[in-house]
Image (cartoon, helix red, strand yellow):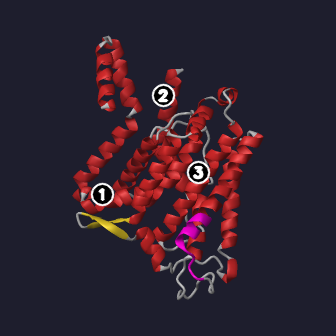
Amino acid sequence: MRAFSNLKASIANYKTLDSKDKKTFWKEGFINNLMYILIIIAAIYTYTQNHKFLSVSSIVNIISLSAANIPIALGIAGCIVLTGTDLSAGRVVGLTACISASLLQSMDYATKMFPNLQPLPIPVVILIVVVVGGIVGFVNGWFVAQFKLHPFIVTLATQLITYGVLLLYIMINGNNGQPLSGLDNSFKNFVTGSLVKFFGVPIPNYVWYAIIMIAFMWFMWNKTTFGKNMFAVGSNPEAANVSGVSVFWTTIAVHTLAGAMYGITGFIESARIGSNQANTGLNYECDAIAACVIGGVSFVGGTGKISGVVMGVFLLRIIFVALNFLSINANLQYIIKGLIILVACAIDMRKYLVRK
């Protein structure tokens, strides 16, 4: 009902505009929504070339791939709301994925990293990776808040540190950097198993976990003091400080929560890909940042919605799946990803400059 009322109000306002303002309205609307228009065109074109693109199995695949990337996007969105970013996200995913795999390898696996260690209870492993991710996030937030360093510099440094820790970790017990696989069936079934089918196509369990994460983050952003403080600091840290908001602790809390979400992403990714190595999580932060910007989380700060982040993840995944259906060269896809990030950020900043 609220959306319908807003639509009616927008139509009424449009009718009051003169011809010049109406042209400006359509021009700005086209430019501001250019990314969505291009994605829709790409999806339609892909369907005309390959009808399997919109088959049930393809749709479930898009949903599943999106669900796997939603936690990291939800985490990094908070950093962007604070006018920052987080370049360490992908490496934290890699570290926590390898930790999850090493603690949940099957006992009969020949090259088990810890031969005498029984697979730990899954809740314990989730807690461990959340704590590990949270520690990295806390370090990021503390350096940003304490020394007023730009998040780009801080997270660039922690990205390298985390990668170094990961490389050292996978060398433990003579593992010598071998991929961590041979995962316990209970772990694989918990993450990639299926209890529900959609027209005969199984939906992985981690889709439901992603929905839980969405609900949790929506609550944190919209119904808690933490969320209000986050948007206040992102909009105007000086004004927020005068209003009694602790900019220091809000910054740390946002980054710590982001790190915890990366840990959950690593846990899911560990079972999803089945074979974890040093390159696990590489460039995941790029996709997450692109999804956030496409979804309306502005680098200007103080702006963003959880629904927008989720929509951005889905739209970006649709593009990547479409590229595969069109048999686009994998190397060329990196160029397309870069262009998507560049165009999305340019459109976002243009909105801000026009308002000024």
Residue that numbered label 3 is attached to: 258
What stretch of residues is rendered in magenta? 118-128
* Res. 343 visible in picture: no
Dot 1 crowding, Cα within 10 Å, few <14, some 14–19, many 20+ = some
Q: Nearer the viewer, residue 234 or 1?
A: 1
Q: Which residue lies furthest to the right in this view?
A: 147
Residue 178 appears left or right of 30: right
* Distance CA(mark 2)–CA(mark 3): 26 Å
Q: Mark 2 points at which residue?
A: 351
- Disc with the residue nearer the chain's start (3 vs 1): 1
Q: Is the magenta stretch mostly helix, strand or loop?
A: helix
Q: Which of marks 3 and 1 is in front?
A: 3
In this view of the protein, which residue sits in the foreground, 266 or 211?
A: 211
Q: Position of residue 115 (x, y in %)?
A: 62, 86
Quadrant assignment, res 295: top left
The image's mark for residue 59 is 1
Q: Which of marks 2 and 3 is nearer the N terminus?
A: 3
The amino acid pointed to by label 2 is Lys
Q: Which residue is at a point 24% across and 67% down the rendered structure image?
A: 200
In this rendering, the answer to whether 223 lies above or below 50 is above
